[in-house]
Image: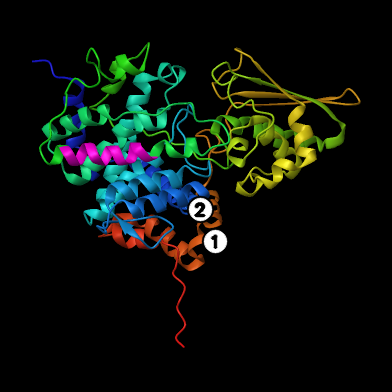
Amino acid sequence: MATTIATQLAHHFHKFEFRQLPDASRIAVKRLLLDYLGVAIAGSQTESGHAARMFAQCGGVKAESTLIGDSVRVPAALAAFANAISSHSIELDDIDVIALFHFSPPVFSAALAIAEQQSASGKQLLIALAAGCEMMERVSRAANSSLRNRGFHTTPTCGVFGATVAAAKLYRLTPAKLTSAFGLAGAQASGLMEMYGPSMQKRFNPGPAARNGITAAGMAHFGFTGADTIFEGERGFLRTFTDKSDAAQLTAGLDQPYELDIEFKPYSCARPIHNAIDCALDIRRQHQPRLDDIKHIAIARHPDWAHYHQNKTPQTYHEAQVSLPYSIAVALKEGQALLKQYTDRKLRDPVLRKLCALVTISADASLPRGVSCKMTMTMSDGRNFGSQIDYPKGSIQNSMSDAELRTKFDALAAPVIGEAHAEQLADLVADIEQLSDIGKLMRLTAKPRRAVRKS
């Protein structure tokens, strides 16, 4: 008897146990957990992170899960919602190899909230994280690039299924209930690419995905049934969200260990821009061009991304973080593209504005990868400097070391929670397999309360 895709996936993830977790995947999700926590802690202090935390505190009084960067505990679904937004608020979250989505905002936010609610162990959390990431990547592989090209944002639309699996593992759903949860997740899949501009819109998108994944798993846990044909059905996810899909990717190799390909961001901007930043830094390092003598900066990008990130006059730092011209300009001028390079104040810098105006972008189908970038800088004396980057820093082929990830974490977390808490948090992540209760880890993500002086 033929079974639906959701049923096959439900049986696959139900059987998923810690002893089946490949060492490579275990290490990958631990590295990502440290990265996620640092990014979310820093992001919680931004305007968008603050607004999300305030909203979560208005939504309920049941203290279940920690708001990262705060000392308040709220219902799990609200914590997942707010933490997902915080973790996507500074453009330093992880990325998949094609630069289409971010694993951690929907999956890790949902998993940590439910793990804390359920007093789960570190091993249980790792299983949920790995399963959720695998599910999210399977959906993206089946639906993209058609899903993205139709205007849907992959992180939330595919992430809701990953968040659902992560929550389901921690709720210990049966295969039948997980099958229903998939249907309920599909009913809530959403997220549009109409998110670029001066607003906080892009930051919002992972929030509902994390919350909705918990809702799908929770409703199924209490017996609410969902459509088992949610993926391949006549009006299911693939036919609705794509013009062209490959449903076989959802169940390919279910009997084989799944290799997670997770990449990390060293720069505080959209991932497809990182190649251009590396080009700029490469030219800066090799040739030290005088900024006043730069006449033109020609950027060739693969057609997959050539028509994105073209804004030369960003009005807010939100826009700057998805502006290739601005990111090139600040990298050339300051030799960095970190969080402190993306501020509203810097947008008024006349040198940066002039450099932005010199950038032109064209499509080049001969480039080998979707995120590949080739830069040609023309100087006023006629000299040309060039650089091509196919694998940016943080990619699988040009990875960030454990030491570099730890430096990134410390730089993001310590200013918010203090050096002592940051060190304790990193130590817990490093040995998380031995942790008996995730609540101990989450309590360290809170901004310390100041002691009240007694008169």
Q: Secondary structure at mark 1?
A: helix
User: How far across and how far down the image is residue 24, in percent?
Assistant: 37, 40
Horizontal relation, residue 116 to residue 38: left or right: left
Which numbered disc flags the more N-terminal residue, 1 or 2?
2
Q: Residue at x 22, y 27 (%)?
A: 255
Labels in figure, total:
2
Let me know if residue 258 appears in the view: no
Q: Secondary structure at mark 2?
A: helix
Q: Residue at x 60, y 17 (%)?
A: 367
Depth check: give the residue in front, 18 or 250: 250
On whether residue 383 falls in the magenta region, the answer is no
Determine whether label 1 and label 2 are within 8 Å by CB.
yes
* Magenta span main SS: helix
Q: Residues within 10 Å of mark 1 (few under 14, many from 20)?
A: few
* Spatial separation of the CA atoms under disc 1 and disc 2: 8 Å
Disc 1 marks which amino acid? Pro
The residue where tag 1 is placed is 415
The residue where tag 2 is placed is 42
Question: Quarter-wise, where is residue 210 in the image?
Answer: top left
Disc 2 marks which amino acid? Ala
On whether residue 214 falls in the magenta region, the answer is yes
Question: Quarter-wise, where is residue 57 in the image?
Answer: bottom left
Q: Which residues are magenta?
A: 207-219
Depth check: give the residue in front, 106 or 12: 106
User: How far across and how far down the image is residue 379, in percent?
Assistant: 85, 27
Quick check: 83 above or below 358?
below
- Quadrant showing the N terminus: top left
Quick check: 444 above or below 261?
below
Looking at this view, name the residue that lies furthest to the left.
1
